[in-house]
Image (cartoon, rainbow, N blue to C red):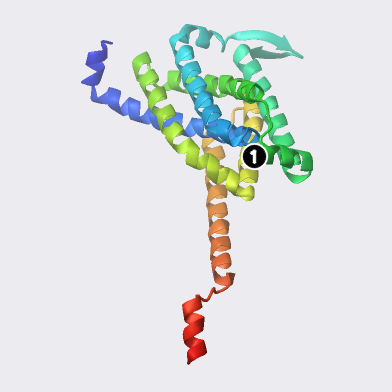
Amino acid sequence: MDPFGLLADPEAWIALLTLTVLEVVLGIDNVIFISILITRLPVSQRDNARRIGLGLAMGMRILLLLAISWIIGLTAPAVTILGHVFSWRDVILVGGGLFLLWKATTEIHESLEGAEAHAQEATGTANFGAVIAQIIVLDVVFSLDSVLTAVGLVDEVPIMIAAVVIAVGVMLVASGPLSRFVNQHPSVKMLALAFLLLIGVTLVADGFGFHIDKAYIYAAMGFSVFVEALNLRRARRRNRDTSPVVLRPTFLKEHADS
């Protein structure tokens, strides 16, 4: 369809809005992963790594959208392992899911047990290239999932690309405050790592042909975030109630004179 014709089509605008919301929801996983990885970098490099990671995610999604025929071909049977037929999409999902499980598990272990990891996180001595490489690996998996969702909902490539650009723009604006919030609250960071474990399991299961409705996953994540928000509010109120009262010097002098 002519791009100018799309602008005058109400259904195209509805499709754009729907797909943009879905892309933002699907991109939350990516933002969480990037937020956790960049804590290993020096503070001066974290914003650059976050922008580069999200920029790569957007570029990868657009490239995959422009190669839709190749993407659809990835869903065709490719290899047979122990009697189970896998497509290249399945292989990518299983590999990405296992990588996510490994990364989330090591991060949880180091957060709980690794004093060395705490020192590295505090000083930010991680290699910038290594962090970007890990972001790229997961960008490939998340981008593939995102593009397949877009292809299943919309037929027009311009709408898909516009939705991806808008969604990444929203994530870029929200990722800074979200990254700071996650890293300032250890319990929230642990919850985010648990989310990544859950997502890793769903990717592996999907790769083996066991589809798990993402609505259940996001419902569980939403409920967990709600409970954690209540815990944080309770902690803030408790700290406020138990904080010592500081008397100003003028107040003390007035009462001493009286």
Which residue shows up at 74% across the image and 35% down it?
A: 106
Q: Residue at x 57, y 30 (%)?
A: 45
Q: Is residue 207 above or below residue 34?
A: above
Q: Residues within 10 Å of mark 1 (few under 14, many from 20)?
A: many
Give above or below for 87 relative to 232.
above
Q: Secondary structure at mark 1?
A: helix
- Dividing the picture into quadrants, the one containing residue 24 is top left
Q: Is residue 227 left or right of residue 162?
A: right
Percent of width and height locating residue 143: 52, 21
Quick one: which residue is furthest to the left in this view? 8
Can you give x and y, in whole percent of width and height, for residue 137 in the image?
62, 20
Q: Nearer the viewer, residue 129 or 237?
A: 129
Give how far across and how far down residue 26 sits, in percent.
50, 31
> Where is residue 34 drawn, in percent x and y?
57, 31
Report if residue 156 is visible in the image: no
Task: Please say whether residue 253 is visible from this viewpoint.
Answer: yes
Image quadrant assignment for residue 12? top left
Along the horizontal axis of the image, is 160 left or right of 7?
A: right
- Relative to residue 10, is residue 45 drawn left or right? right
**Front-lying residue, 43 or 111:** 43
Q: Residue at x 53, y 59 (%)?
A: 233
Q: Is residue 113 above or below residue 48?
A: below
Task: Identify the amino acid type marked 1.
Answer: Leu
- The residue identified by callout 1 is 193
